């Protein structure tokens, strides 16, 4: 089991009149090599769930086992180390550093991991080539289209060869053709063994996943194939 969360709660202003249960007793298991879409409307809890699964935040209550390690009560520094080792992130807003070239943006997580400069060059160029951006390695984000920036963001996510890719609305800022290309890259990575967790509000995008988890009001209300969850 790659990911297992049990009875996860995320509660803001607990015990007060303004209490909000962003997650309300969520349990979920994800195996190595799965392609899972987590779908829900705005405010459903899907982004909160991704933040916890991605070790960007911690739950108020509950247990989280990631790749055999209990990460429930880890410190911020420990969580950062786990994130860097286990998870690559892709965001709707790309999150590239404007002053850095495509090469330098992709290189950054490898520097954090302490990878040698010689290994970094090979890994960065391989990641950029993987997403069709090797010829743009000198370009800064302002010199690239949205689709090109997202491909560089994917290269950055896969450069460290993490077992898990978490993609939060990765096609949200793209036109439909470019969005399809991004999804094709994610599916190709999944076919090579990478676990993909895709966060989306779009039924059509969720329907491309083999498994779909629907969340509403902080609870999982459906979990299964496209037919089983009614897409």
Image (spheres, rainbow, N blue to C red):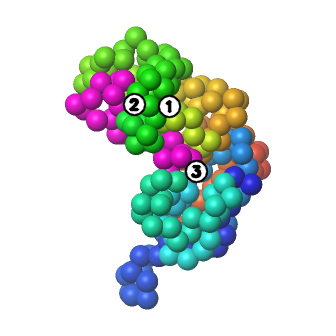
Q: Residue at x 22, y 31 (%)?
A: 99
Q: Quadrant of the N terminus?
A: bottom right
Q: Which residue is mark 2?
A: 107
* Magenta highlight on residue 131: no
Q: Is residue 101 left or right of residue 150?
A: left
User: Counting residues from the N terminus, which is met first, the one under dot 1 or under dot 2?
Assistant: 2
Q: Is residue 147 visible?
A: no
Task: For marks 3 and 2, give the CA distance.
Answer: 31 Å
Task: For marks 1 and 3, give the CA distance.
Answer: 27 Å
Q: Residue at x 42, y 60 (%)?
A: 77
Disc 1: CA contacts within 10 A as few (<14), some (14-19) or many (>=20) = many
Compared to 227, does 146 lie above or below? above
Q: Which mark is residue 159?
A: 1
Is there CB contact under 8 Å for labels 3 and 2?
no
User: Counting residues from the N terminus, which is met first, the one under dot 3 or under dot 2?
Assistant: 3
x%, y% of residue 12?
A: 41, 76
Q: Secondary structure at mark 3?
A: strand
Q: Residue at x 66, y 33 (%)?
A: 190
Q: Secondary structure at mark 2?
A: helix
Disc 3: CA contacts within 10 A as few (<14), some (14-19) or many (>=20) = many
x%, y% of residue 110?
A: 44, 36
Q: Which residue is mark 3?
A: 39
Q: Quadrant of the C terminus?
A: top right
Is there CB contact under 8 Å for labels 1 and 2?
yes
Q: Which residues are magenta?
A: 83-106
């Amino acid at each position: 089991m790659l990911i297992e969360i049990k009875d996860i709660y995320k509660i803001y202003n607990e015990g007060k009149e303004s209490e909000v249960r962003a997650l309300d007793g969520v349990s979920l298991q994800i195996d190595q090599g799965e392609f899972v879409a987590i779908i829900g409307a705005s405010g459903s809890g899907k982004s909160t769930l991704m933040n916890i699964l991605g070790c960007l935040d911690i739950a108020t209550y509950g247990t989280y086992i990631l790749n055999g390690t209990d990460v429930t009560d880890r410190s911020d520094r420990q969580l950062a180390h786990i994130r860097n080792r286990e998870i690559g992130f892709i965001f709707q807003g790309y999150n590239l550093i404007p002053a850095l070239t495509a090469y330098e943006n992709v290189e950054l997580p490898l520097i954090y991991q302490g990878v040698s400069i010689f290994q970094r060059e090979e890994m960065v160029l391989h990641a950029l080539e993987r997403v069709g951006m090797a010829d743009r390695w000198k370009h800064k984000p302002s010199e690239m289209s949205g689709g090109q920036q997202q491909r560089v963001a994917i290269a950055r996510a896969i450069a460290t060869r993490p077992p898990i890719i978490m993609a939060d609305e990765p096609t949200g800022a793209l036109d439909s053709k470019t969005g399809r290309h991004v999804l094709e890259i994610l599916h190709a990575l999944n076919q090579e063994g990478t676990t993909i967790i895709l966060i989306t509000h779009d039924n059509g995008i969720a329907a491309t996943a083999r498994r779909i988890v629907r969340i509403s009001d902080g609870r999982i209300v459906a979990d299964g194939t496209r037919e089983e969850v009614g897409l």
